[in-house]
Amino acid sequence: MSDLHWDQVRSFFDPDLMGSLPDVFVPDTSAEDWQAVFDLVEARGWQWEFVQGDTALPLPLATDALARPPDAELVELKVRPVPGMLAIFRLMSAEEIDFDIDLRELQGQDGVDTLCRFLGEIGRKLGKPVLMTSEGGSQAHPVLGFDPVLDRVVLLADPLVR
């Protein structure tokens, strides 16, 4: 059974309302949590590319990736858990796992189910909430997210109206 239904969340998957790349985050994390995400990506066999600037690199230990000097080039872990879905993790700090997803790839009930499975995988691995806001939106106002207590993705806001 689906965590969420398309009719409930259609507005949260509308790139015109949410932005093409809504922000997803896991608060209160550590380098160990980042490593758990790296391990999950490898264990699930998801396609990935680790990039620093314009250079593709092997996947390092999370502690090494997070220990870059402040003026170092941005590092990203681009993950395709399934064909047609891209999540871009940006390693900016150990204290929060941040990533974007492309809503244009996640339309209809299949897109909702794909996102719910992905957020659930991460949330279960970490035992923490995984929250989504609009692109550039306030983290104080997530619209949906994985709730580790309920073990499913739930709505956290009323649907948006045009």
Image: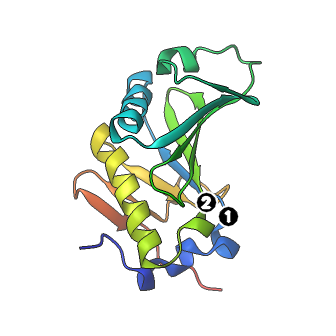
Q: Position of residue 17 (x, y in %)?
A: 66, 74
Residue 127 showing in the rendered view? no
Q: Position of residue 109 (x, y in %)?
A: 42, 78
The residue that disc 2 covers is: 102
Element assignment for label 2: loop
> What's the CA distance linking mark 2 and mark 1?
6 Å
Q: Residue at x 67, y 64 (%)?
A: 20
Q: In this image, 7 relative to 75: left or right? A: left
From this view, report whether residue 95 is shown above or below residue 128. Answer: above
Q: Position of residue 9 (x, y in %)?
A: 46, 77
Residue type marked 2? Asp
Q: Position of residue 92 (x, y in %)?
A: 62, 30
Q: In this image, 133 relative to 53: left or right? A: left
Label 2: how many Cα within 10 Å (few below 14, some 14–19, many 20+): some
- Is 160 in front, or is 125? 125
Q: Residue at x 50, y 60 (%)?
A: 142
- Mark 2 and mark 1 in contact? Answer it, CB < 8 Å: yes
Residue 144 showing in the rendered view? yes
The residue that disc 1 covers is: 20
Image quarter (top left, top right, bottom left or bottom right) of the N terminus: bottom left
From this view, report whether residue 11 is shown above or below residue 43. Answer: below
Marked residue nearer the N-terminal end (2 or 1): 1
Image quarter (top left, top right, bottom left or bottom right) of the C terminus: bottom right
- Is 2 in front, or is 42? 42
Residue type marked 1? Ser
From this view, report whether residue 109 is shown above or below residue 122. Answer: below
Q: Residue at x 27, y 50 (%)?
A: 148
- Is 83 in front, or is 116? 83
Element assignment for label 1: loop
